[in-house]
Amino acid sequence: MAGMTPIFRRKAPRTPQDRLVTLIRKPGCHLCDDAQAVVEKVCGELGVPWEGKDITEDPRLHDQYWEQIPVVLVDGEQHTFWRVNEERLRKALA
C-alpha cells in the first residue's frame, strides 16, 4: 500500500524459528567447545536454529574474527565473543 507510514509496515514479532544463531569456531579450541555447549543448550530450549562455522575454512571469517573466537552471531549481528553467557544469549533470543 503506497503512502503508508513506516509504523504500519513493522515486521511481525519474530518467532524462535525466524532467528539464527551462528557459532564461529576453530578445531581444538576449548573456549569454542564451551561456547557450543551453551549455544546448543539455549537454542535447544528455545527452539532457535543454530549453525557452526569453522574459521579455518572461510578466509573472510578468519580475517574478521581470528582474534575473537569463539564468536556468536545472532541474526548475523555479533552478540559476543570468547565466553558465551547463557542468560545474556537467552535474553537476546527472547
Image (tube, helix red, strand yellow):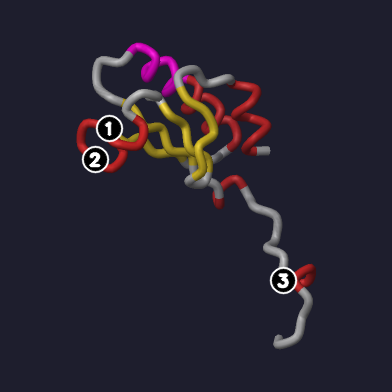
Number of numbered discs visible in the structure rendering: 3
Q: Is residue 90 magenta?
A: no
Left or right of residue 70, residue 19 in this image: right
Residue 3, horizontal then vertical, whole percent: 75, 86
Q: Are marks 3 and 1 in contact (CB under 8 Å)?
A: no
Can you say which quadrant of the picture contains the N terminus? bottom right
Magenta residue span: 30-37
**Marks 1 and 2, how far apart in space?**
5 Å
Disc 1: CA contacts within 10 A as few (<14), some (14-19) or many (>=20): many
Magenta highlight: main SS: helix
On residue 9, the disc is 3
Closest to the observer, 63 or 78: 63
Of the numbered discs 3 and 1, the one sitting upstream in the chain is 3
Q: Are marks 1 and 2 in contact (CB under 8 Å)?
A: yes
Give the residue at x 40% y 24%.
68
Q: Is residue 32 magenta?
A: yes
Left or right of residue 51, residue 93 in this image: right
**Marks 2 and 3, how far apart in space?**
36 Å
Q: Which residue is mark 2?
A: 58
Residue type, mark 1 in image = Ile
On residue 55, the disc is 1
Residue 45, horizontal then vertical, whole percent: 58, 30
Vertical comparison of 49 with 28: above or below: below
- Find numbered disc 2 in the image and state the secondary structure of the residue it sits on: loop
